[in-house]
Image (tube, helix red, strand yellow):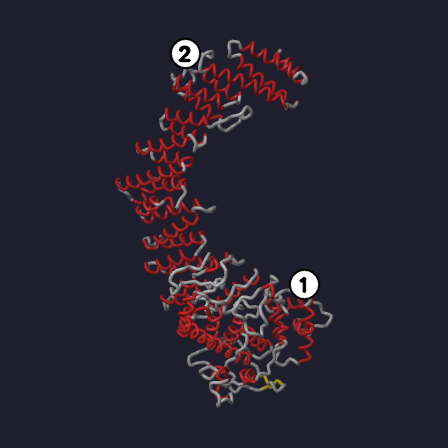
Amino acid sequence: MVVDCWNCIIYPPQSLCLFCWLFLSLSVLREKHCVCVCVCVGALWMCIVLNPHCKSEQKCVWLRQLRRWNGVDVCPWEDGNHSNELPNLTHALPHGNPDSSSRPHRTVFTRAIEACDLHWQDTHLQRIITHDLYTHSHAHCHHDNHGSAGALFDARGWPLWHEHIPTACARVDALRSHGYPREALLLAIAIVNTLIRQQQKHLELFRSHKKELLHKGMTSVTNMEGWVGHPLDPIGTLFSTLLDTGRGDEEGRNAFLDFSGSVSSAKRSEPHLFPAQRLLDDGQSFVALAVETALIGLGQQRVMPDGLYAQEKVCRNEEQLLAKLQEVELDDALVKIFRKQAIFLLEAGPYSGLGELLYRESVPMHTFAKYLFTSLLPHDTELAYKIALRAMRLPVLESMAPSGDLSRPHHIVSMVPNRYPRWFTLSHIESQQCELASTMLTAAKGDGRKLETVLESIQKNIHSSSHIFKLAQDAFKIATLMDSLPDITLLKVSLELGLQVMRMTLSTLNWRRREMVRWLVTCATEVGVYALDSIMQSWFTLFTPTEATSIVATTVMSNTTIVRLHLDCHQQENLASSARTLALQCTMKDPQNCALSALTLCEKDHIAFETAYQIVLDAAVTGMSYTQLFTIARYMEHRGYPMRAYKLATLAMAHLNLSYNQDTHPAINDVLWACALSHSLGKNELTAVIPLVVKSVKCATVLSDILRRCTLTTPGMVALHSRRNSGKLMSLDKAPLRQLLDATIGAYINTTHSRLTHISPRHYSEFIEFLSKARETFLMAQDGHIQFTQFIDNLKQIYKGKKKLMMLVRERFG
């Protein structure tokens, strides 16, 4: 059935609609383990139309069908996001970034339509794929060694094939798909030799203009169309063609390509040996050539494409190619190739993704560099670190091109405006950058010079506080492994990274901020007492005042820290002195949030404690709320300073305002406590606080509660929580209780009128209970009965329209 479907795909009936064909293609591609239909459809049709024995009549039929499907409005677009603007695949690519709005969109069939113009009639191409030993000496161009033949062969005399690389690789794929693995291999070798020759030309070109380019500090895009992530997967095609041959996976066959118009059959004189092996250097293998091809493609400097689909495809194809490379076991020959390509990548300027000149929106090299780093590290440590450090760059996040010495290897240049592009895979890219840095940190353990270099690179190139924090934690874990003594150099690196995180997140919101602060203190503790003292000395650049007092200073002065550091008495005192100084500085800067913590930290130092208390008094007038002042006042009472508590309570009362209907306000308990404190201190203190209460509290029930409590005991004679008192009680007819009683009666009168303005029948019973409490307060005065009777009579007269309510009032109060 798959064969019938394949024939239907290659020779579609005129009545076959686009959706039916796509569904049919999906079925076949699934059989072939293809995941992405949009990509595979384009590559599939490229293979079909590039059949070397395709007749012109067949190609015309296909072209008409492809154009018909291509014109359908819902035809899938090549890059998945309706914005592919690459030029015709048969033309040379431009060096600029043309306006995307002026370029036509490309569908999954566009490349196949363009490929219908391609042919196999080029003499040089035919000789490449049909002659096992086609070299410069066989080209019949002995008279012109430096002319046209010079461009068709390399210095060894082996053939080259100059064509748009993805198109040339599509020819290789077509040859393999149509049963010509030998011809595909020969063409693949010619393409790879061309890539290697171009590499050398690019290196020579950059070296000749290096000073000029570095002086100008500018670079242009050398490849708008990257090979890795390309819809035709050129590097993957070359890699698999060469690797399958090297592993002996290609099935032998008897037929071979004959451009005379027939397919010949013959037995190979050496069936166990591909004659193409004679086009390899001594000691070279197809596997080595495949690996070198992959390294060339992965190291290409290329522009990140537009759109989520295209960007994800770049990342996915890179990871797939690296996974295939990791399956190849490295030997001495491959290590030599790795060294060669690594050196080229470092020195090739704008032609390499790891060159000195980097286009701002180039595809990052983090994942590739991590693979190179781990592969080269056992064999060439210095080269491995050079590659990894160069790859740490992420210029797309730079706000502007850095200034300074342009000749420095890490210098980044850009010719595009400083804008933030739409990189949908940026989070993934930053994660890979973080992984590369973590790999270097792990490998550099014990080497102070390399750790310092890696630290500088991280601080310069990583812009995410979360990723730097992760690196700091990783370094800390590596440095404090249980089976060995702590690596103090790596611990210092971890601390430096933590300090950078603190500076980065100091003025920005980060939900992990408290975790970061706590971790930094832990890390500084592991480093030593001098690290703790250092972060406390420079706290204003690292922490908010609240963090510095509630987390940093508190942790530093805890018993756990003292035991962990094995401090003597002198060291403990010095560290505590620094913590108290920090606390006082924070209190001056933010008394509202730091005062209580500072007082707690300064308890054992009388001078520091007095200083903190004075800072609170100075800030109490304008800078602190009643809630904060009441909290500090309660703390003072708890520590045995009742007069200071009283002072702070009176300051808090000045900021308070309780209206008539706020009988459940959270500050009520604080007001009751303040009055109880004043009462316990004596008549003078109570006399001073009652006017503040009358001014701040308008709620009748709260005032009546305060009044009753003040009449139960004698001021200043007993403790606050005593139940009985044998002394003389205060008179309600004299100050200060007379003022409080009058204010309470007035509050009940005002509250009653306020309630009656908008009362509903369902609240009548509640209102009657409220009047009962009011009568109890009225009766505390000498003429209270008369006052309450007059009050009830006034209510009956004013609110006589509320007949049912007044009837309930008469029933209860007469």
Q: Is residue 410 above or below residue 184?
A: above
Residue type of the residue flagged with mark 2: Lys
- Can you give x and y, in whole percent of width and height, for residue 402 in the image? 42, 59
> Quick one: quadrant of the C terminus?
top right
Secondary structure, mark 1, is loop
What residue appears at the point 42 percent right and 81 percent down from the top-left corner?
A: 282
> As rendered, which of 341 and 626 lies closer to the eye?
626
- Can you give x and y, in whole percent of width and height, for residue 753 in the image? 60, 20
Residue type of the residue flagged with mark 1: Val
- Can you give x and y, in whole percent of width and height, for residue 186 in the image? 52, 80
Secondary structure, mark 2, is loop
Please indicate, yes or no, whether residue 611 appears anywhere in the rendered image: yes
Residue of label 1: 74
Q: Is residue 567 above or below residue 683?
A: below
Q: Is residue 133 above or below residue 614?
A: below
Please indicate, yes or no, whether residue 273 appears anywhere in the rendered image: no
Direction from residue 339 to residue 81 in the image, left or right: right
Residue of label 2: 728
| Label 2 environment density (alpha carbons within 10 Å; few <14, some 14–19, many ≥20) | few
> As rendered, which of 28 and 409 lies closer to the eye?
409
What residue appears at the point 57 percent right and 77 percent down from the top-left corner?
A: 171
> As rendered, which of 54 and 478 lies closer to the eye?
54
The answer to which quarter of the image holds residue 585 is: top left
